[in-house]
Image (cartoon, coloured by chain):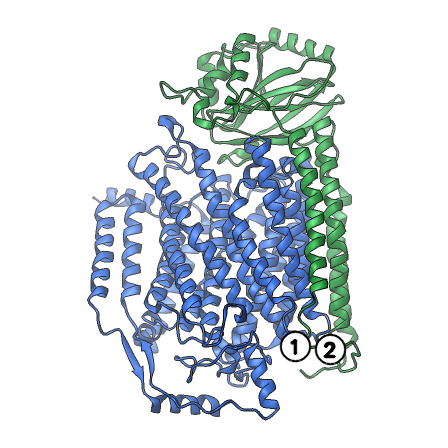
Amino acid sequence: MLERLKEFASEFFVTGDPLIYGADVAIGITMITIVTVLTYFKKWGWLWRNWLTTVDHKKIGIMYIIASIIMLFRGGVDALMMRLQLAMPNMDFLHPEHYNQVFTTHGTIMILFMAMPFMFGLFNVIVPLQIGARDVAFPFLNALSFWLFFLGAMLFNLSFVIGGSPDAGWLSYPPLSELSHSPGVGQNFYIWGIQISGIGSLATGINFLVTIIKMRAPGMRWMKMPMFTWSVFSTCIIILFAFPILTVTLALLFLDRFAGAHFFTLDLGGNPMMYINLIWMWGHPEVYIVVLPAFGVFSEIVSTFSRKKLFGYKSMVFAMLIISFLSFFTWAHHFFTMGSGADVNAFFAVTTMLIAIPTGVKIFNWLFTMYRGRIRMATPMMWTLAFIPCFIVGGMTGVLLSVAPADFQFHNSYFLIAHFHQVLIGGVVFGYFAGLYYWWPKMFGFQLEEKLGKWAFWTWNIGFYVCFMPQYAVGLMGMTRRLSTYGWDTGWWELNFVSTIGAFLMGVGFLFQVAQIADGIRKYKTLKASGDPWDGRTLEWSIPSPAPEYNFAVTPRGDDIDEWWEEKERRAKGIYPPEQPLEPIHMPKNSSIPFIMSVFWFVAGFGFVFGWLWMAILGLAGVGICMIARSFSYDTDYYIPVDEIKRTEASLRGSV
Amino acid sequence: MNKKPRSLIRIIIPVVLTLVTIALIVWPMLAGGQYVVLDPKGPIGASQRDLIVISTILCAVIIVPVLILSAVIVWRYRDKPDNKAAYEPNWSHSTKAEAIWWTVPIIIIGLLAIVTVRYTYDLEPSKPLAHEKAPITIQVSSLDWKWLFMYPEQGIATVNTLNIPADRPVKFELTADSPMNSFWIPQLGGQIYTMSGMAMTLYLQADHEGKYWGSGANFTGEHFGEMRFDVNATSDEDFDNWVAEVKQSSQALTTEGYKALAEPGTSNVAYYSAFPEGLFQNIVTKYVVDGQSAHSKHGSSSEASGAIQSPTDVSNQDEDKSAN
C-alpha cells in the first residue's frame, strides 16, 4: 500500500528538479502565510463578503488586475529563466524538455492569463464609469466570468508542481500536443486551463457588448462615446467571433486525447493543419483583442495630458472597427511557409498589410492630439509617449513579415520573436501600465508617487530595447525560435548575452513598480486622491475616488465626448446643472454561486486532466446544481435608500 | 503640476543610459556573427534579400518622418510655463490633414502590395528555376530529431549533411515522418514546412561553391535544436566524386535501418550507399486511408491541371516513381 502511494506521489507531483523543489517550498510558505494572516486578523469573513462573493464591477476589476500582475510575475520569471539559458552557448541551466515547458507556459500565461485579465480588469473598472452606468449589464455573469478565469488560470498553473507542464508550444500544434507525443497530463492542463477561463472570456465579451449597447447614460449617442469605451466595444465584437473558435478547437483536441478521436492526427483521416488553421483563426484576432483596448487607453491619456480634445474622433472609431473586421482575414500569415500556393499567400499578405493603414492613421491622430496641446509628463503619459515610437517600429517589422516571400526568411526566426514582443510589450503592456497608472487613483482613492514610477519607466524601456533589438539581428543571422541551446560556432552569443541583460533590466523595472505600489500603500493616507486628480475629461472623473458602490448618485448625462471637461468649463462660467433629487438606487446582491460554481469547474477540469471520470462527473454535477440553485434564487437585488446615499456622498465629498 | 528647474543630473542620466543602450546594441552587431539572410549565395535568397530591402525602404518612407515628427511635437508642445507654442484645446478636426494621412499609408501599402504580389508569384517555392542545367532532385524528410536526405538520381542518402552541386537548381521534395518541421538554408533562400502526408516542393540554387548553414526552423519537441546540417555546394565534378565515394565507402540504408533511424533520437552525420526504393513515397503515403489518395485530403488546388505547380501535386510523386 505504502509502495503504491509512493509510486502515485512520484507521478502526481513533479519531482527531480531543484528549481521545482524551491518553488514547492515557496508556494507552501506563501499559502501558510496567507492562511495565518487571514486567521490572525479575523479577515476570512471580510474576504468572503467583500471580495469572493462580490458582484461589484470595480472590485471584480481590481481582482482581475491583481491576478494579472501575479501572472506577469510568473510569466516574467519564465522569461528570465529562458534568457539565462540562452545567455551563453552550451548553457546547462535548463534541460531541453524543461526549457520547452518554460517557453510554453511563458507564452500561454502572458497572453491568456496576463494580458487578457489585465484588459478585463480595465474594462470592469472603467467602462461602466465612463458610460455613466451603475454596473455592467449582467453583474452575476461578470463575477462568474472572473472566477472562471481565475480558477482556469490556477488549474493551468498547477501543472508546474503537479503532473507536469505542457511543452508543445503556446499554441500546442498537433501531433506534438497529441497523446502520441505528449503522453503526460501537461497538455490536459493546457486544454482545461484555457477552456475554463475561455468560457469566462467569452461571457465577458458578451457582457460588455450588451453593457455598452444598452446602458449608456442618456444623451450618450454612439458618436459621443469615450474612445476607451469604443475600443472595448470593438474588442468585444472580436471576442464574440473569435473565442468560440478556440473553444471548439480545444474541445476537438481534447476528444483526440481523451476519447481517441482523430480530428488532428493523420492516421484515420484527421489533419494537423486543420488545427493550425483553427487555432490561428482565434490566435490572430486575439492579438487585436488585447491591443485595441490599449489603443483606447492611449486615446484617453493623450487627450487628458495634452489638455486637448482627441483629434479625429470619427477616424479613430472607423479605424478601430476596420481593424476588428480585418483581424479575421489575416490568420494564414502565420504559415505562409505551409505552401498554400501564391494565390492564398498573396491574399493574406495584402490583408495583413492593410491593417497598417488604420493603425497608422491612429498614430497620426494621437500625434495631432498633442499638436497645439500642453503635454504634461506624468507617468501615464510617459508610457504613452514610449509606446508611439516602439509601436511604429514594431508595426513596421510586422509589415515586413507580412510580405510573404520575405517571410520565408523571417518565419520562426528571432526576427519574428523580436517583432511580436515589440508590439505586444510596446503596445499592450505599455498600454495597460499607462491605464493602470492613469486609473489607479480612481480604483484605490490614492495616487502613486511618481518618482519610483519614473525609475520603473526608464529601466523598463531601456531594458526593452536592450533585450529585443539584438533579437532582430540574431534572427537575420539564422537563429530560430525555441532553440534551447546553440554552439560557439554560430556567432550568436554576443547578441544573446546583451538580450539577456535587457531582460533582467525589465525585471528590475517590474521590481520598481512593485516598490512603487508598496510605497503607495504605506503612505496612502497622505496620497489621498480627489475625484479628478489628472484634470480628466470623461465621466469617471466626475465622481469621488474611489467610486461609491453605486457609482453615480444621480444618473449623469453624456451629451459630449468629453462630458466632464465640458461640465467643468460650464461651471467655470458659473452655469451649474439643475439639482436633481436623489432616488433609491437599484443594485444587485452579492452571490456566492459564481465562486462555488467555478470551484466545481476546477474540480471537473482537474478530473479530466487526470482522466478521473468520477471526479469530472462530480465537478460537472456541482456546476449543474449551482445553475439550478441560481435559477431558483429570486432575492437577487436590493435598493439603497436615499438617506444612505446622502451619507455616503457627504463623507466621500467631504474628504475631497 | 509644480515645475522644478531641471537639474543637470536629470538630463545626464537618460542621455548616458540611452548611449549605453545604443552601444550595447551596436557593439555585438559589429563584433561577430554573420547576417546570413542579408548575405545570400543563390538567386532565391538574393531575390528575397532584395524584397526585404525594398519593403524596408518603403516602410521607412513613412516611419522615419513620423518618428521625427513625434519627437518634434512632444518637444514643442510640452507643458512649460514659458512655452510660447500655440495652444488650441478645441482643435480636433481637419479634413485636409486626415485626408493626407489616410491617403499616404494607402499609397505606400498599395505599392508594397503590388511588389509583394509580384514577388509572391515569382518566388512561389514550387516554381522551377530557369537555368540551362536540369535540376537535381533531393528528397528531404524531417525525422525526430534529424534530417534524412535522399538522392533518387544518385541512389544515395545522407543524414544531417547535404551535398549539392553549385550553379545548378536543386529541386527539394520535402516531407516529414514526425511533427511538422521547417527546412531552412538562409543563404540559399527561405524556408518551407515539411509535413507528414504531404510532399512539398522547394527550388533553391547555390551560385557559388561553399558551406552553408541549414537547420530545422519549426519546433518539434525535445531535441529539435540539434536538427542542424551543413550544406556543401561543390562543383559538378566534386559532387560526382563525392557520390562515388559514398557509394563505395558506406553501407546501404535498409527498411529496418530506416525504421531504427526514424525512432525519436538525435543522430550524427551519416552516409548511405543506397536506400529502399520508393522510401520517400512510402513516407508521404504512410497515413493514406484506403480508397483515398494522399493528395485528396489536402485541398484540390492542383487538380486544375497545373498552371502553377502545387506543392501537393500528385504528379510530382508520379514523376518520381518513374524516375526511380
Can you identify the residue that label 2 sits on?
B87
Disc 1 marks a residue whose amino acid type is Arg
Left or right, A301 with reference to B211:
left
**Which labelled disc corresponds to residue A425?**
none
- Which chain letter matches label 2? B
Can you identify the residue that label 1 sits on?
A307
- x and y percentages locating residue A501 in the rendered image: 65, 54
Rendered blue, the chain in question is A
Rendered green, the chain in question is B
Q: Is A188 rendered above or below residue B233?
A: below
Q: Circle 2 sits in a helix, a strand or a loop, which is it?
A: loop
Left or right, B289 with reference to B64:
left
- x and y percentages locating residue B230 in the rendered image: 65, 25
The structure residue drawn at horizontal position 44% and vertical position 47%, both measured from the top left corner, is A17
Q: Circle 1 sits in a helix, a strand or a loop, which is it?
A: loop
Disc 2 marks a residue whose amino acid type is Tyr
For the residues labelled 2 and 1, say whether their Cβ atoms are less than 8 Å apart: yes
- x and y percentages locating residue B266 in the rendered image: 52, 27
Badge 1 local density, few (<14 within 10 Å), some, or many (20+)? many
Q: Is B75 rendered above or below residue A280?
A: below
- Which chain letter matches label 1? A
Task: Please give the count of numbered marks on the rendered protein.
Answer: 2
Near-viewer residue (A25 or B109): B109
Left or right, A246 with reference to B270:
left
Q: Is B96 rendered above or below residue A573?
A: above
Left or right, B60 with reference to A24:
right
The structure residue drawn at horizontal position 74% and vertical position 23%, both measured from the top left corner, is B210
